Image (tube, grey):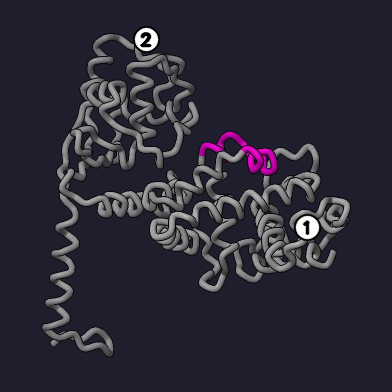
Amino acid sequence: MVTNGDLLIGPDEQAAAEQQIVDQSKRIDFYITEYTVEILASKMRAKEYVVPRYQRAFTWEPERKSKFIESVIMGLPIPFVFFWEMEDGKLEIVDGSQRLRTLEEFILGNFQLGELDQLSHISGFRFADLPESRQRKIKNKSIRGIVLNELADEAARLDMFERINTGSKIANKAEVRRGALAGPFLDLVMELADDQLLISLAPMSKKQKDERGYDELVTRFFAYGDGLHDYRDRPSDFIFKYAKKMNLAFATDPTLAISYARRFRETMEFVQRVFPYGFRKSANGNATPRARYESIALGSYSAMQERPEIVNFGREIFDVESWLRSDEFVEITGSDGANARARLENRIGFVRGRLVAA
């Protein structure tokens, strides 16, 4: 008999635990391999390595690419690349697409190195500028890979992506959800993230766009709009669980995609009619503060739920400019404690209350 604090763990519990470990381990079937830089670059060029749609765009800036190439040339340890073996024998990149695309661009493309810290004498070089002997040595360097083979089920592959990326500073939360939770709800999120009305109402930088900033706005709209009863001041956990649940719901009832898309678009159209600057702070604003977006988008949706007739009201009915400029609104949409549930409910309620009272 084993004790764990006040809990007595007997033979039956131990056997059940062991069986669970065995069952879960069977889902993971992988092998470790090494690839030369030359092979990695060539297979990327030949599209033997597949970048799935849930992977982000090629977002590494030139400085980061240069630093990575410098590390390769110096022989510094490079993190494992993770693959999933597809039925046709090609390898889907689970983690490492930025590194692989950078190698291809340098070895087979025309990428020019920026200012380097350690190898300053090759700053500004392209691969072809290096001596042939050094080119061969770089091509012969190897990077280790882990391949989750075709016998592993898809759930294991997505679980691996989540475990690799959750909490990572490299892949953000929207990207993790794309990878770990591919499904019909996330399909709708990606569709609406490209909605031109949303893009015009909520401008953001290219970097934010490439890092799935619009995915995040759409997902938060639905997650918070469907209720905050399970919210515990950790938006990433709350939204991840919500998206997982909604994938199942959308798979069970495909008509949900139509109603949710209508909900989102009707709200965006209302915001366009009523709020003179959309989600921006001013007419010339080129950024979308997330707290401001949440207050206006969710406040508007909530108000339309409470008082449906305002859906077709125009700007002349609401004096939004006066209370958008108020000290109270500025304070509740500030960044201090922005993710606390009380702050979230307060800023949504502020907009809802004033729209309903109009």
Is 323 displayed left or right of 129 in the figure? Answer: right
Q: Secondary structure at mark 1?
A: helix
Magenta stretch contains residue 197: yes
Q: Quadrant of the N terminus?
A: bottom left
Label 2 – label 1 distance at C-alpha: 55 Å
Q: Which mark is residue 129?
A: 2
The one nearer the camera, 268 or 77, is 268
Point out the stretch of residues depicted in magenta: 196-210
Residue 254, picture quadrant: bottom left
- Disc nearer the start of the sequence (2/1): 2
x and y percent of residue 107 in the render?
Answer: 33, 18
Numbered-mark total? 2
Magenta stretch contains residue 255: no
Is 34 displayed left or right of 307 in the figure? Answer: left
The one nearer the camera, 206 or 153, is 153
Residue drawn at x 19%, y 50% as measured from the top left: 152
Is 333 displayed left or right of 66 in the figure? Answer: right
- In the image, what residue type sits under mark 1? Val
Residue marked by disc 1 = 330
- In the image, what residue type sits under mark 2? Asp
Residue 241, picture quadrant: bottom left
